[in-house]
Amino acid sequence: MPSSKRGIASARRASTSTKRAAVPAKGPVVAVRRFGGRFRFVGDTIAEMKKVTWLTRREAAYLTGLVLLVAVSVGVVLGLIDLGLSGLVSRFLLGG
């Protein structure tokens, strides 16, 4: 039994000493790197946007109309289902 306690204690000491050794040496902090990363991100984003194959105006209009048509159709179907179910509930469960 005592050997297992020593094993746990030595493992704790080993992990503590590892954590202390992993701390990097302090050096001068450069503020330019902080902002340089943001500007690089913006530049990379613009470069990626130039690589995109964009839709033509005709394709965009067609797909927008298709989305609107599907949304209205689904709305009408769900509205009719809701109307039918509310009528059934009021007739059979509420006695109206």
Image: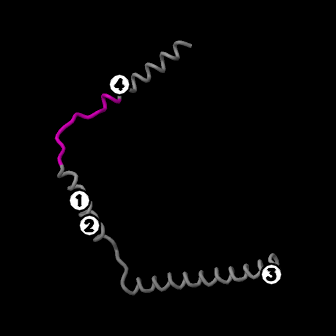
Element at label 4: helix
Amino acid found under the numbered disc labelled 2 = Ala
Cα distance between the residues tagged 3 and 4: 76 Å
Element at label 2: helix
Front label number (3 vs 1): 3
Element at label 3: helix
Q: Identify the magenta region.
A: 19-30
Nearest to N terminus: mark 2 or mark 1: 1
Whether residue 20 appears in magenta in the rendering, the answer is: yes
Q: Residue at x 36, y 85 (%)?
A: 57
> Residue 49: percent from the left, percent from the top?
30, 70
Nearest to N terminus: mark 3 or mark 1: 1
Front label number (4 vs 1): 4
Outermost top residue? 2
- Residue, disc 3: 91
Nearest to N terminus: mark 3 or mark 4: 4
- Residue, disc 2: 47
The dot on residue 40 is: 1
Q: Residue at x 25, y 58 (%)?
A: 38
Residue 64 or 52: which is nearer the viewer? Answer: 64
Cα distance between the residues tagged 4 and 2: 46 Å
Q: Is residue 86 left or right of residue 37?
A: right
Q: Is residue 27 above or below residue 77?
A: above
Cα distance between the residues tagged 2 and 1: 10 Å
